């Protein structure tokens, strides 16, 4: 598994961007990770260095290096990866909303990281490592949520299932609905935000911003549909957000771009001037996901709101049961 792989671009993939190709074939590879692989020359197209936005041609060969998740977890000997502790198992089970022989669907808590980093040692991917010891194969993340975003996240129990789901996510067969409380009220009440994003460095770490003229080579197309469900005067609004694309911080950056940042969002200004008594936490929740099950049937699942958002809904007089199952 820890070997260089070489893939040939299929005829139907001609014209596809390299980052989209990776999204289909290796859904676990984040854009940031792919950017690192291309920047260091580890990923090559037709023997040459490539960028994430390189357009592919049929019959070209793509060199894929050994990937982090192909290696033993955390690059440690297998003997060092331990099964879940009773406390970790309890945490994982508390998140499970659905399980079958192919997938888990979890309701991730706000503040719980999906993947580790230099300062993050307790995260969902770590739980999956321990779970893999028991299952014989490590479950894989199919997509991601920001640390402070709560709600629905899908886990594949096997690599083949992850690949099948990755293709669904790349072809928009997956429908996702988020709920958020934003500062102010978006105008018009319903709309489409199509603003390409680019990563910017800041004092508060990486964040996304609208791209500018001359940055087209590095920008990522990003599209979000939004709808105001309810509002509290001009102070706040409850909005339903439906991303067409899946860029890092997309919903947060887009809502800030139109002047209504998500409440509690420290990266995008939503933490400023919050109403007294409101929890200073990100008010963004992955509410619902719908997609064809890789084996048969359809998955359609809704995650209950976290406690801090329920409290804010009560404070503003919003009724989370207003629309039943087909809300937003």
Image (tube, rainbow, N blue to C red):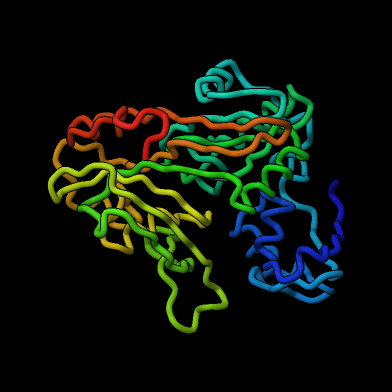
- Residue 36's image quarter? bottom right
Quarter of the picture holding the C terminus: top left
Left or right of 197 in this view: 311: left
Q: Is residue 25 visible?
A: yes
- Residue 319's image quarter? top left
Q: In percent of the image, x 23 and y 34: which residue is there?
A: 318
Nearer to us in this view, 312 or 40: 312
Left or right of 180 in this view: 130: right
Q: In percent of the image, x 62 and y 23: which residue is there?
A: 99
- Residue 223 in percent (x, y) is at 46, 60
Residue at the far top in the pictured view: 86
- Residue 237 in percent (x, y) is at 23, 46
Q: Is residue 296 above or below residue 266?
A: above
Q: In percent of the image, x 20 and y 47: which residue is there?
A: 236
Q: Is residue 282 visible?
A: no
Count of numbered tags: 0
Q: Is residue 193 above or below residue 97?
A: below
Nearer to us in this view, 65 or 303: 303
Q: Is residue 65 above or below residue 278?
A: below
Nearer to us in this view, 316 or 44: 316
Q: In percent of the image, x 69 and y 63: which residue is there?
A: 37
Left or right of 238 in this view: 201: right
- Residue 304 in percent (x, y) is at 40, 27
- Residue 195 in percent (x, y) is at 42, 67
């Amino acid at each position: 598994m820890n070997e260089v792989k070489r893939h040939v671009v299929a005829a139907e993939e001609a014209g596809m961007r390299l980052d989209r190709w990776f999204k289909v074939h290796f859904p676990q590879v984040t854009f940031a990770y792919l950017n690192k692989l291309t920047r260091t020359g580890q990923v090559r197209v037709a023997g040459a260095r490539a960028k994430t936005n390189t357009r592919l041609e049929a019959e070209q060969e793509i060199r894929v290096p050994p990937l982090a998740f192909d290696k033993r977890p955390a690059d440690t000997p297998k003997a060092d990866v331990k099964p879940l502790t009773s406390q970790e198992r309890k945490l994982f089970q508390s998140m499970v909303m659905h399980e079958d022989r192919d997938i888990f669907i979890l309701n991730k808590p706000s503040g719980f990281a999906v993947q580790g980093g230099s300062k993050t040692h307790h995260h969902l991917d770590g739980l999956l490592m321990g779970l893999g010891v028991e299952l014989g194969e490590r479950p894989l993340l199919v997509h991601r949520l920001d640390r402070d975003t709560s709600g629905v996240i899908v886990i594949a129990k096997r690599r083949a299932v992850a690949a099948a789901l990755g293709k669904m996510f790349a072809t928009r067969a997956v429908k996702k609905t988020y709920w958020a409380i934003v500062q102010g009220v978006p105008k018009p009440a319903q709309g489409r935000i199509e603003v390409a994003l680019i990563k910017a460095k800041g004092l508060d770490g990486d964040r996304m911003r609208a791209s500018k003229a001359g940055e087209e080579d590095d920008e990522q197309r990003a599209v979000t549909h939004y709808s105001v469900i309810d509002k509290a005067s001009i102070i706040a609004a409850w909005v339903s957000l439906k991303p067409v694309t899946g860029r890092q911080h997309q919903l947060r950056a887009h809502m800030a771009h139109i002047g209504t940042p998500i409440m509690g969002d420290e990266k995008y200004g939503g933490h400023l001037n919050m109403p007294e008594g409101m929890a200073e936490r990100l008010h963004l929740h992955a509410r619902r996901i719908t997609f064809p099950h890789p084996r048969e049937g359809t998955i359609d699942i809704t995650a209950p709101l976290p406690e801090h958002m329920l409290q804010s809904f009560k404070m503003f007089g919003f009724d989370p049961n207003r629309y039943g199952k087909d809300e937003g």
